[in-house]
Amino acid sequence: MSEKLTMERAKELLGTTTTEDHLFQHALAVSACMGAMARHFGADESYWRAVGYLHDYDFEQFPEEHLKHTEQPLRDAGVDEESIYAILAHGYGLCTDAEPKSDLDKSLYTVDELSGLIAATARMHPAGIADLQASSVKKKFKDKRFAAKIDRAVIQDGCNRLGMELPEVITLCIEGMRPAAAELGIGPRE
């Protein structure tokens, strides 16, 4: 019998497959963004944060086969189907054909890449994320050479699926990430 994913369980499961600090940092950033998105949609914030934290469950072990080693192990671990589907859907069009359907799915699909762009922009700012504005991130969004690996088409597609404007989603994610600035390494520069 599966129960709704909790942050404690998400951390436990990610800890069985992941060792690299930057991947835990990314998990935390996505989790923070998902918390903000849950608040926006009036959804269960702790649940959405847990799903965000666990989204790259198999990435370190299988970077070339990302999400191909996720579904069954998570099901075997008792993770609920809604969480598993959202995790698979964040790779839609890149490594899965699980289309984002719910607000949970669409949010995770959108903020996975967006959290990286926000963190990269914050690292360029003297005050880090503390006074970062959506306009600064949007400027970097348009500069394809900045954080070039970040898939802007996925971010835009995600915003379209959510029926939200890019600056609105950026603002929510910045607000979500601010409290974790120190852990994410995006606080003020010393």
Image (cartoon, rainbow, N blue to C red):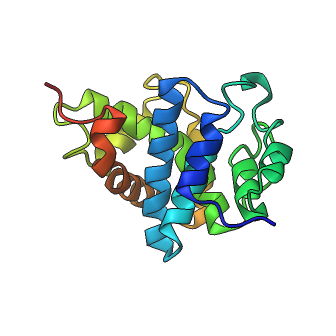
Say above or below: 188 vs 39. Answer: above
Q: In which quarter of the image is residue 150?
A: top right
In the shown orientation, is residue 25 left or right of residue 15? left
Looking at this rendering, what residue extends furthest in the left direction?
190
Q: How many marks?
A: 0
Residue 54 in the image: state x and y as whole percent: 62, 46
Whether residue 95 is visible to the viewer of this picture, yes or no, is yes
As rendered, which of 88 and 166 lies closer to the eye?
88
Looking at this rendering, what residue extends furthest in the bottom direction?
42
Residue 41 in the image: state x and y as whole percent: 50, 73
Q: In which quarter of the image is residue 94?
A: top right
As rendered, which of 61 and 177 lies closer to the eye?
61
The residue drawn where x is 60% and y is 44% is 12
As rendered, which of 121 and 78 lies closer to the eye?
78
The residue drawn where x is 39% and y is 59% is 172
As rendered, which of 96 and 146 lies closer to the eye?
96
Q: In which quadrant will I find the N terminus?
A: bottom right
